[in-house]
Image: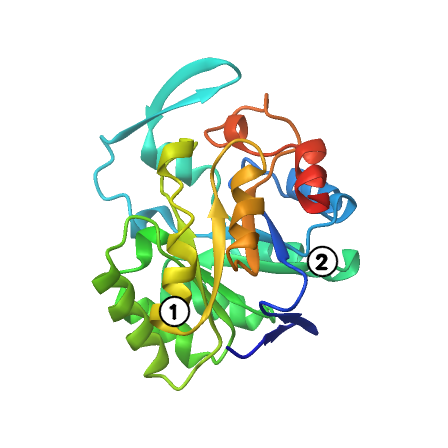
């Protein structure tokens, strides 16, 4: 499997593991908080930070749907639509955060949910794309990612092997071979018995591409095991403080934990 070069960094099984601090929606819709998180990610040694430039209307059609999560030690139930809407990033926000990452010398990337979202990222000069597990079966979106000729990361949580095969074929039919698959269990946090790290060498063998691990477990053991089994890319949710309000902070790694991950 050939290495992939992203912003002058080689990604491959013989290279140091590429580590992503997934900020996701942990900025809580606050660009200034996002910038503080970028600074912290640099300090702990992450290679990249990842955001989500989704549009809530792309995936929440029923506004009566609710989401239950733990925030600040309490169980919270709220509207899915309202939760995601308040954390949306505008194209102007993306531009500002991309420029801030450039000045901080850390790689910026993001997960779009539409072709418009892909275009927004291409316009600001993103060096790679990421497709979330929930969009693995959105083949037109994957095709559009392939057509950009940018390195692309496809996360495979919830997917069958047949669904992964269809996504990989769709991507490669564009002529783009710069593909990384992420093994992922879409459970937050992921119980130890559901991690199934042996899927990593299987994905590499079956699809002949670089493989990484999107880690939703507590602690660093699973990520270390993933690298031992051939993962060249580790992504883990990142927060400044587990006690900040919001759905993902409680199971995200804080700076001390993330620094230990990088060191490990």
The correct choice, above or below, for 176 with respect to 179 in the image is below
The correct choice, above or below, for 187 with respect to 196 in the image is above
User: Residue 114 got which mark?
Assistant: none
Residue at label 1?
A: 205
For mark 2, does the 10 Å Cα neighbourhood hold few (<14), some (14 to 19), or many (20 or more) residues?
many
Give the x, y percent position of residue 197: 43, 48
Which residue is at a point 44% across and 20% down the rendered structure image?
70
Which of the two residues, 167 or 116, is positioned nearer the viewer here?
Answer: 167
Q: Is residue 166 left or right of residue 21?
A: left
Give the x, y percent position of residue 194: 35, 37
Which of the two residues, 198 or 18, is positioned nearer the viewer here?
Answer: 198
Q: Secondary structure at mark 1?
A: helix
In the rendered picture of this protein, how many numbered marks are placed on residues? 2
Which residue is at a point 59% across and 25% down the rendered structure image?
242
Q: Secondary structure at mark 2?
A: loop
Residue at label 2?
A: 106
């Amino acid at each position: 499997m050939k290495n992939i070069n992203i912003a002058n960094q080689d990604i491959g099984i013989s290279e140091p593991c590429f580590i992503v601090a997934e900020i996701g929606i942990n900025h809580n819709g606050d660009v200034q908080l996002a910038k503080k998180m970028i600074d912290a990610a640099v300090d702990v040694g992450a290679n990249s930070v990842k955001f989500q430039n989704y549009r809530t209307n792309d995936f929440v059609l029923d506004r009566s749907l609710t989401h239950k999560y733990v925030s600040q030690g309490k169980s919270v139930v709220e509207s899915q639509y309202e939760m995601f809407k308040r954390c949306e990033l505008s194209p102007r926000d993306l531009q500002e955060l991309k420029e801030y990452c450039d000045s901080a010398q850390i790689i910026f990337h993001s997960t779009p949910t539409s072709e418009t979202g892909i275009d927004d990222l291409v316009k600001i000069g993103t060096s790679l794309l990421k497709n979330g597990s929930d969009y693995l079966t959105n083949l037109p979106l994957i095709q559009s990612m392939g057509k950009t000729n940018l390195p692309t990361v496809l996360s495979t949580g919830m997917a069958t092997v047949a669904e992964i095969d269809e996504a990989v074929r769709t991507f490669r039919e564009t002529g783009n071979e710069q593909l990384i698959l992420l093994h992922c269990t879409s459970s937050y946090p992921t119980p130890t018995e559901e991690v199934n790290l042996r899927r990593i060498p299987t994905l590499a063998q079956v699809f002949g591409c670089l493989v990484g691990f999107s880690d939703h477990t507590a602690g660093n053991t699973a990520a270390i095991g993933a690298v031992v089994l051939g993962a060249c890319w580790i992504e883990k949710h990142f927060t400044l403080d587990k006690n900040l309000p919001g759905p993902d902070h409680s199971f995200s790694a804080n700076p001390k934990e993330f620094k230990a991950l990088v060191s490990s």
